[in-house]
Amino acid sequence: MNRLFLFVLALGLLSSCGPPEATWYRGNLHTHSFWSDGDDFPEAITQWYVDNGYHFLTISDHNTIADGERWLAIPRSHVRFATFERYLQESPEGWVEWEDGADTIRVRLKTYAEYSSRFQAPDSFLMMLGEEVSDGFEGKPIHINATNLIEYVEPQHGGSVVEVMQNNVNAILEQGERLQRAVMPHINHPNFVWAIRADELAQVDGERFFEVYNGHPAVNIAGDSLRHGTEKMWDVVNTIRLRDGRPLMFGIGTDDAHNYQETAPNRANVGRGWVMVRARELTPDALLGAMDAGQFYASSGVTLAEVRVEDGRYHVAVEPEEGVTYTIEFFGTDKEHDPAPVPVLHPETGDLLSYRYSDDVGRLLQRTTGTEAAYAMSGNELYVRARVTSDKPMANPVVEGEVEMAWAQPVEPPR
């Protein structure tokens, strides 16, 4: 029922960005806390997102949904003790449960049900229960976020990278089917430890989302001399998927934050990547239904005023900042183009590392300097997507020279 449920919701959206009454909502679907390998309490993390203008959040810790009783031991000599003192000071009276000790204190981590209740506010801020289902194959980390869960999802394993992804996506979607609930999986950071190739990602059924932008400094979104970056992977994935009769895959932006005590390029900090979703209301059904229909964009700083497809034209308009220059580009792959992948082998072992694809996969179709542009689709394209690049430096970049950007979703031209 899950896919059908989201499809029915999507039928209510009148354009590629939703009906006229829809609103843009800002959210992050991937971040971490003390429940796994983050370095702060969930309440403090959530408060940051509330204070910084977000409308929804999923804290997606590794292989847990933050339930049951868990105590965190913190030596007084450890840097985390200052984090605890701040948590104690900023929490409501009587909120923090902790035990004093001579050298070490113990503090109980609040469950999702407890901490989310402090922040949920109708039409203002929404939390959705999530988990980063963290699995692997032959040393390759394969992580899939699950948003709007009720129950914990056990890693499913498998005999290949594709099988591990497929088994875990199936388990996530099965929960939605069984509980009659909108549940959304998305593939995380495919280039983390070079775990997932584009051709492997393209084969997953039931999956519509992956992270085209992830703010963690270790996930290799730019690729390297042997492997494509995630944006090129996106083009490869959709070229393969459409030719195989599968639906488009959409691109998400996330923080993947782990580090809240120190802000630096080499730390996984908040505020680097997010999604802007155009939905009827701030509810899980409306948000996830809109995303399933492609009614959202990913951003690392650029705000879009409009994204729509009308009469065969893909329109993009930026909400400009004074003194900032914007470049709007449209990309796509022609229907007749043969991707002709070239294997890339390890120079010493001869093992397959990746495939390289030509520049005709996801080629540049049009470039406009300005705050508004439209691309007239010829019908010869498999798909068209849009990217907006500003000349404004990111406040907290992962790499030197990184600028604020936005990525609008691919669409198929009218038939």
Image (tube, rainbow, N blue to C red):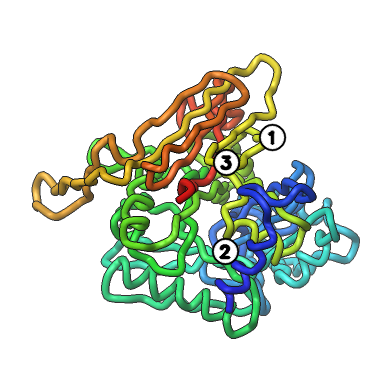
- List the residue tagged with mark 1: 305
Give the mark nearest the N terminus, 2 or 3: 2
Residue type for callout 2: Asp
Residue 140 seen anywhere in this rendered image of the structure: yes
Give the mark nearest the N terminus, 1 or 3: 1
Q: Nearer the viewer, mark 2 or mark 3?
A: 3
Residue 33: quarter of image:
bottom right
**In this picture, is 55 found above or below 361?**
below
Compute the Cα span from label 1 to label 3: 19 Å
Q: Secondary structure at mark 3?
A: loop
- Place of residue 356 in the rendered image (x, y in percent of width and height, measured from the top left): 22, 43
- Place of residue 34 in the rendered image (x, y in percent of width and height, measured from the top left): 62, 61
Q: On the rendered structure, is 189 left or right of 300?
A: left
- List the residue tagged with mark 2: 61
Residue reaching furthest to the top: 323
- List the residue tagged with mark 3: 311
User: Disc 1, disc 3: CB below 8 Å?
Assistant: no
User: Disc 2, disc 3: CB below 8 Å?
Assistant: no
Q: Nearer the viewer, mark 1 or mark 3?
A: 3
- Place of residue 303 in the rendered image (x, y in percent of width and height, measured from the top left): 66, 34
Residue type for callout 3: Asp
Q: Secondary structure at mark 2?
A: loop
